[in-house]
Amino acid sequence: MFVYNSMGTIDQNALDKLHYVTELTECIKVKSCNSKDEDDSFHFSRFFPAFVWTVRDFILELKLDGHPITENEYLEHALQLRPGYGAKVQKYNFPRQCIRSYFPSRKCFVFERPVSCVEKLRKLEEVSENELETSFVKQAKEFCHYVFETAKTKTLHGGHNVTGTLLGNLAVTYVDAIRSGAVPCLENAVVALAQIENSAAVRQAHEHYMKEMERLVKFPTATIEEFSELHAVCGKEAIQVFMNRSFKDDDRTHQGELMRVINLSYENFRQKNEQESANLCTKVITDVSKTLEERITMGYYSKSGGYRCFIEDQEKMIKDYKASIVKGIKLEDVLNDFLKEKEIIAQTILLADNTLTEKEKQIEAERIKAEATQQEMKVMEKNQEALQQMVVDQERSYQENVQQLMEKMEVDRGKLLEEQKRVLAQKLKEQETLLKSGFDEQADRMEAQIRDLRRDLDQTQSSSWLSDALDALGTVATCFLPGIVGKGIGLATKLFSRLF
């Protein structure tokens, strides 16, 4: 909201002091490539603030042709254009036309003198509120209420709220352009701001994901599903952090970058979870197999009936191992590795046991091989489950990105529609005023702007914006699939080679 403060009355002198508005198009441009005949006020009115003219020490009666008028009617009367084409008429109309064209809404407040006594007026800062004129206090309260109730958050084109950081970057962008001798361009500045802000949004969202995963995940997790659920929660929050800060990511490049870095971090956390589980399982199996290892070292099983003793001790060790495991993601892998290490020892003890016949030894050897294959199958199944969970996690992450993108774009579309409807209503009102005042030529020129606004409004209301966004995001998401597919092929190849 832009509040212009003047004294006395709204006259030509007060209007002339708004000269910077009339020179605005020389100081800044909205689009990077406007046509020569295009009216810049059409673009400026899309994002210009509300205009409030406050007239202090107002001494006139609010009357026109003997009839009472409102403060707003007083302002509109002061901004009326004069018919004609002479130099004096153009000079008179120019500042008025700029205010009418640039500002989407106009409001006027008049204030009587705060105190009637000249002495008090000279020391106004020392006067208490109860010494002020009642009419002035009433007018001031109405003004403050209007500002607090109607002033809107500063936004960029499209309705994205301007934060302190964005405002600072915007100022730097303008100053750099002015220093280089160029005319600052809003369109280029917004594009540059979007790059800065969206990159920061990716970093902030990724940092949130990392921080929350490190806080919530107690390595190793009891199951793959537990880890997956925590990843889903942290990923969802990270996407929300990104959505809250990002804007104008039209090709979804930055959202795709967020998906990529979260996917890499997810993989690192997943590997850490597996490694922690493997370490814990290795420690447990080392503890429960101490008796078995000691007896092997002492040659305890190198005797008649030693093989049966070995099998009984190994089965007891396996039972104790599975009973001791709390974090068992890599339970079968570690057990499989342990049993593979003991295969040759088992075969040696079997061959040396003279209480068994050759037939019994052959049957036992086949049983050992079958159990090893069965154990290998368990490991493969667990790995397959982990791979399938990765695919589920990736699909869930993508769907979460799509869902939040749809919600954000719907909100953004609502903001843009509100902006477009506001500007269209203002242009229609201005056109109606021009027609009533006999300025048919200016009203006709405004008709082209109104057609463009209606066309933009129709495009915003269409659904093509969503399909384009989802296509862009879908293209980005496909870059993650080859890695998962490759892991699946490798796992299948390994399983095939073990079985045959």
Image (tube, rainbow, N blue to C red):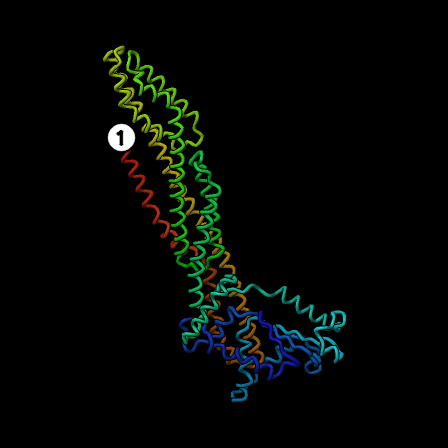
Q: Position of residue 317 (x, y in %)?
A: 38, 22
User: Residue drawn 35% across and 47% down?
Assistant: 480
The kind of residue on which mark 1 rests is Arg
The residue depicted at 33 percent of the width and 15 percent of the height is 309
Task: Measuring from the top left, give residue 132's x and y in whole percent.
Answer: 74, 72
Instruction: Tell me the residue at 48%/68% (across/down).
Output: 171
Residue at (24%, 13%) from the top-left corner? 359
Residue beneath disc 1: 498
Relative to 240, say whether 391 is above or below.
above
In the depicted structure, whether residue 215 falls above or below residue 61: above
- Taking the view exactly as shown, the residue that stands out farthest to the front is 298
Q: Is residue 421 above or below residue 360?
A: below
Tag 1's secondary structure?
Answer: helix
Most distant residue in the left direction: 358
How many badges with numbers are in the image? Answer: 1
Where the N terminus falls, by quadrant? bottom right
> Residue 319: x percent and y percent?
40, 22
Residue 214 visible in image: yes
478 vs 452, nearest the viewer: 478
Q: Nearer the viewer, residue 124 or 205?
A: 124
